[in-house]
Image (tube, coloured by chain):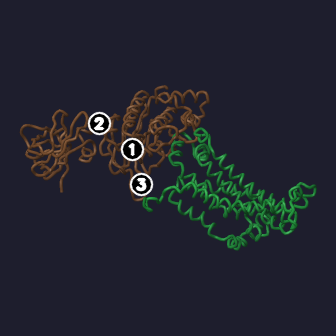
Chain colours: A brown, B green
Amino acid sequence: MTTSSGATVELRGVTKSYGSHQALAGIDLDITPGEFVALLGPSGCGKTTALRALSGLELVDEGSIVIDGVDVARVPTNKRDIGMVFQAYSLFPHLTVLENIEYGLRMRRVAKADRRTRAAESLDLVGLSHLGERFAHQLSGGQQQRVALARALVTRPRVLLLDEPLSALDAKVRVQLRDQIRLIQTELGITTVFVTHDQEEALAVADRVAVMRDGRIEQIGTPEELYTSPATPFVANFVGLSNKVEAQLVDGTVLVHGEKLAPLGTPPESGPVTAFIRPEDIVFAATGLAATVVASSFLGSLRRTSVRLADDSVLSVQHEVGFAVEPGDTVHVRFLGSAVAVEPRD
Amino acid sequence: MSAASKLGTEPSRLTRFLILSIIGLLFAVPMIALVIFTFKAGLSGGQTLDHWTGLFAPDAARTYRTLFTGIGNSLLLAVVTIGIVLVLLMPTMVLVHLQFPKLKRVLEFICIIPITVPAIVLVVGLAPVYSIVVKVLGGSIWTLAFAYGITVLPYAYRAIQSSLDAVDLTTLSEAARSLGANWLTVLWTVLLPNVRRGILAASFISVAVVLGEFTIASLLNRVNLQTALLQVYQSDPYVAAIFTLLALAFVFLLLLLIGWLGRSRRDRTTS
């Protein structure tokens, strides 16, 4: 299969409403050729609507959707030259795997011999060349989604759209297919937009992640930027784990249990705030805040322990597996001093 | 084991056999009686093949002209009725299913109504309509298919709807569109093949309903299979019985055809 050059994608002031509910409240997004962007957010945040608007399956109320310099906001789906993989299994049940993959080429009136060759190549790309004559119901969920990916890629689309394609799969297959998608995307250099509600998935595969909330993009950045420098408390809370700790903001400094931490972004006015502190930014120490171990979980390469402080608040601490504690143990914890996201507390 | 825990368990083999035998007899006895009747030589009780061979006599076409006219009319009506189902009902249902799912209940309600209206009441309502239809389109028999299109609605609707519900047509059609297919191509290459079984069932059930319809044709003074059978029955009950059997056999064959044609390449691969 030949390498695609990838297209630029620009969304400008895109809005979409369903009755009184505004699903997209003015989305602006720039995607460079060959980039892999994930739209991440909770249910109802508008991420799927944004993807469907990009595909043409939903017509937008206002704004422009520009692919390679051409506004396609009013262009029907079948003329947008996109490839799409859906959350639900979408292989045509009456066609074999190869016929499914050939479908897009048939629509483009590609000669039969060429169709067969390209479909076989595409199937080979997802590692299922031995299943060409099977029907959808004879495949596992993971295989069906891989065939759907091959079908979406065979036409060499300008943009690949992935609408939670892994959500129906079990954990192991999910990770395998996730990595395979990333590998193929990198190999082909195709501009890709991936919708997911799973932050781990988004952080693992995307070049950039757009965190969405209430029809808007709350923050867009590399996975590292989102994790280490969340622009808002929502992003801090949604991406990765955070301890919500009661604190005071005094003269631009966050006071948490007597320790001073720097706030991320533009801090609110001085007063009571909630600070979002990552579990890995809290450590066990010989001295510090006295606490009692509540529970400790083994997570393979690390361990996460919940401790109760004197004021009855509970903190989650991430530490190495070698340091084992038991519920009831008395320990001391300290904050590492990393900057934290804060939001005013009522 | 308590009585409650037995609830929901499968009936025993004997119980199933008895239930099926009783139901089978309910269907079989009248038909066997009808078959025997067609071989009766009058009230004397003897057996004869004359009633069957008489159908192939040189003057049979003239003798049973009404009957053959009725058969021809009924077959024409069946074809036009199927046309109405396929051209009007099926696309409407697909459109509602994909684009206006909120209207599903309304459409279902409308389609079920004819089953609750007795044919005699329907005819009373249709009589003035047909006086206009005759003026506009003439009194040709095929116009009766408009009425039959209404009477088959509940059966055709159910058959098609069960097929529509069995597949995620929304996702399939969206997938096809994302691959470059326009709506007509989506309908032809994706939707129709996946609701084929429902369309076949709706078509054949429509044929069965049309072949068995008597009230509307009779009260609107049209000749169809059933009105012709009644007419022939009054002069030759044996021939009427033979044609009733043949009509039953025809419908039975149609039902077998549903099963056979409804099996897709996919089903055959599985089995």
**Residue A113 position within the rendered picture, expressed as x and y whole percent measured from the top left:** 61, 27
Q: Which residue is mark 1?
A: A12
**Residue A45 position within the rendered picture, expressed as x and y whole percent measured from the top left:** 35, 49
Eye-nearest disc, 2 or 3 = 2
- Residue A86's label in the rendered image is none
Q: CA distance from mark 2 to mark 1?
A: 23 Å
Circle 1: element type: strand
Circle 3: element type: strand
N-terminal of the pair, mark 2 or mark 1, is 1
**Residue A21 position within the rendered picture, expressed as x and y whole percent measured from the top left:** 39, 57
Whether residue A213 is situated above or below residue B106 in the rendered picture: above
Pointers 3 and 1 within a single chain = yes
Nearest the viewer among A343 and B117 is: B117
Is B188 situated left or right of A82 in this image?
right
**Which quarter of the image is occupied by the N terminus of chain B?**
bottom left
Q: Which residue is mark 2?
A: A223
What residue sits 76% from the left and 60% below the top? B142
- Residue A17's label in the rendered image is 3
